[in-house]
Image: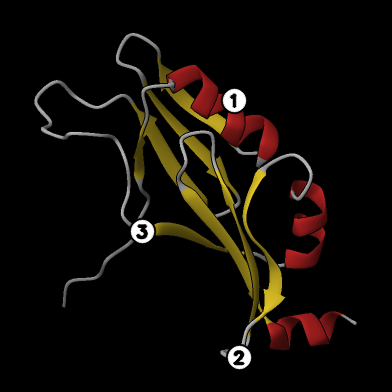
């Protein structure tokens, strides 16, 4: 049987250095590898991995963008909300939803929606 081992997105940007800065300084990712000539970088935080890249010339697109959101499952959504709520552009404020998740969303420097959530059952165990 075929097993999928991992998944990590490649985030396209026209603002290569600014995007790296957002993920390093705001979300506290680590820069694992980068090639400024190719305009490509690999970042990681805990078990989350992302790549940042300027689009290749052979890619056909009208505008850089993503028609969804990136969802991060975190272990302390309340503390992360406190860290990010005054230094980022908010998509929606922290809330507990009927499906059992406490979450919020922000925009990165490119306008991509980044959602952060934690199961309510995990929050109850912490207290």
Q: To which residue does mark 1 refer?
A: 21
Residue at 16% across, 35% down: 61
Quarter of the N terminus within the rendering: bottom left
Q: Which mark is residue 109?
A: none
Q: Residues within 10 Å of mark 3 (few under 14, many from 20)?
A: few
Q: In the displayed structure, does residue 85 sit left or right of residue 51?
A: right
Q: Residues within 10 Å of mark 2 (few under 14, many from 20)?
A: few
Quarter of the C terminus within the rendering: bottom right
Q: Is residue 87 above or below residue 68?
A: above
Helix, strand or loop at label 1? It is helix
Of labels 1 and 2, earlier in sequence is 1
Of labels 3 and 2, earlier in sequence is 3
* Residue 76 seen: no
Give the alpha-carbon distance from disc 1 to disc 2, as whole Å. Answer: 35 Å
Q: Which mark is residue 68?
A: 3
Residue at 54% across, 40% down: 108
Q: Is residue 79 above or below residue 61?
A: below
Q: To which residue does mark 2 refer?
A: 98
Q: Residues within 10 Å of mark 1 (few under 14, many from 20)?
A: some
């Amino acid at each position: 049987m075929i097993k999928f081992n991992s998944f990590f997105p490649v985030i396209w940007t026209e603002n290569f250095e600014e995007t790296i800065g957002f993920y390093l300084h705001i979300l506290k990712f680590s820069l694992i590898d980068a090639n400024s000539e190719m305009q490509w970088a690999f970042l990681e935080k805990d078990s989350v991995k992302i790549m940042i890249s300027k689009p290749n010339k052979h890619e056909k697109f009208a505008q850089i963008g993503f028609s969804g959101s990136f969802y991060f499952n975190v272990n302390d959504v309340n503390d992360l909300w406190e860290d990010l709520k005054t230094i980022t552009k908010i998509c929606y404020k922290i809330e507990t939803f009927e499906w059992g998740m406490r979450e919020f969303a922000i925009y990165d420097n490119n306008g991509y929606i980044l959602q952060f959530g934690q199961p309510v059952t995990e929050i109850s165990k912490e207290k």
